[in-house]
Image: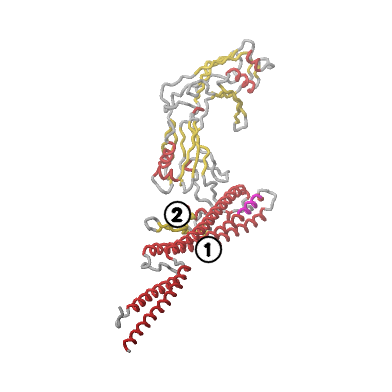
Amino acid sequence: MISLHTNISTMTGLAALRATQDSLVATQETMSSGYRVSGARDDATYWSVATTMRVDLDSIGAVQDALGLGASMVDTAYDGMSAVEGVVSRVKSLIVSAQDSSVDREALQKEIAEAQSAIASIAEAASFAGVNWLDTNIDDLHEADASKRISLVPASIVRGSDGRIDLSTIGLDISEVSLFNGDGGGILQAEERSPKTIGGLRFVSASTETGYTTDGPFRAAVGAHQDFAFDGPVTFGTGDTMSFTLTLGAEDSGDPALPPPYEPGVPLHVVIDRALVDSVLPSAGGVIDTRDDFVDVLRVAVGAPVWVMPREETDSDGEVTEFIRLVDRELSGTDGASMRVSNFTTTTATSGGLGNTGIHYGQTGSSLTVDFEPFRVYRGMVISFDFTSYTNLRSFVIDRATVNEALGKDDGMVQTSEDMVMVLDSIMGAIPNLSIETEGDDFKFVMDRAANRDAASGSGIFVSAVEVSSGPLYDFGILDIDVAAKPEMIESYLTVVDKMHRDVSTAAARLGALKERIAMQDSFLDGLSNTLRGGIAQLVDADMEEESARLRALQAREELGLQALSLTNTSDRAIRQLFAA
């Protein structure tokens, strides 16, 4: 059908040309922007996912910026700590040289003073963007809240399955690297965190570099014994004898902690005659001339159940009195520890000082009273000690958690003897027959004598091998060292500076590890960023080769469309001319 009013071919060609031109514009926009999906109208799902990934990519960029700042702070602290480590090592070698009394300590001290100045200036200069981890000013450094004590560096972001973003951080406890702190607590400063006597569990000793010994209070047992002042010589004729009874191991009926019945002890009958003397002193002719000779004779006469030993006492005038001591070896088989000499008789002119005695009981170590002093267990501090009761040794540990759990606190303070009893009960409560009690402001360990009747050497209470993890603790800092003014402190200086050097090396290693971790984290974030960019490209980026080929194809189609439209218009004019003719 041919119409003068409507050219169907032209309309069709024009529609085709418009579609081609729309596609051409879209392709040109794609090539211009580089995006296949540039908005939600292109592909809502891909656009939403890509937008979320772009947000994550921007967040990672911000984290990397912060990580770079943190890396600079760590680098500054690490370089400063490494420099200080070398200077502290130098100070230690100078102190070693100062131990030689022939060296010029004044000259050595001048070198030490220069090193001290270098240490202080390095710590002060180790600052980046106003942050200094080596020279700090934090109140109560080791007990401060984490918000003041922990420095956090952003490390990464993590988007959970619920869509939430969490920021992970890398933390540094400044108390572990601070060399100098405003109110103390730095690695190179006087140590304020000593638990001192640990409530009385260890001794104070000014003779040690730490001020404390590893030994603690004790109640030692003492065996039963009898002393005789020698008044010889003693001469044994052919028919002479000396005899007596040693009663060993009788229990102490006067001990209020020991319930009846009481063992009466085991008698040991001793006889000394000329034949015995001659067997011990074959050339003496029956004469026991000296105290030591009498000791030798008595050792043979009494045998294994008793030790016989010489001893002396000197009075205020310098006069020496010689004694013979008989000691119960506690081999009688009874629980008691005692000795008594009875039924003494002799036909000799002198007795050598031997004679009847009252009963002597050995000292039984069934209780130990300890002078209590308040103390504090700081974060990270571990106290260990051995406790021996009635020959049974056990080891125990007290840390901050032990104290806080026992007392319901959070500050590690053991303020009273009642607190101390609660702490010790929490770790020692399972020891059979042992109770721990307060005694006024002090406390005591008590063994139940009714449950364990052992006496003397079978008893005893000892605290020993006391160690504190943060020791040695000292009351001077590295800037206080003066080998010229205080030569008596040189040994202590060496011990303490050696510990300081170890602590500085540990702090440098900690900073080095943090530096390496930040570098690894930064490398990971670089890779993660690249992965995210690749994922976004897969979702929304245009394939420029494909789009270029499409553009050329659409341009060719546009040209053909124009030509086709021109033809349809030519046909229309021919028909109009025909009818006009």
Q: Secondary structure at mark 2?
A: loop
Residues under numbered marks 1 and 2 in contact, where contact means CB atoms less than 8 Å apart:
no
Q: Nearer the viewer, residue 478 or 217?
A: 478
Residue drawn at x 65%, y 15% as measured from the top left = 279
Give the labeled residue for mark 2: 144
Colour convention of the picture: secondary structure
Magenta-drawn stretch, dominant element (helix, strand or loop): helix
Kind of element beneath mark 1: strand
Judge the density around disc 2: few (<14), some (14-19), many (≥20) Cα neighbours within 10 Å: few
Magenta segment range? 88-96
Marks counted in the figure total 2
Q: Nearer the viewer, residue 291 or 267?
A: 267
**Three-letter code, disc 2:** Ala
> Which residue is disc 1 drawn over?
128
Real-space Cα separation, disc 1 to disc 2, in angstroms: 23 Å
Tell me where residue 351 appears, x and y as whole percent: 59, 18
Q: Is residue 93 magenta?
A: yes
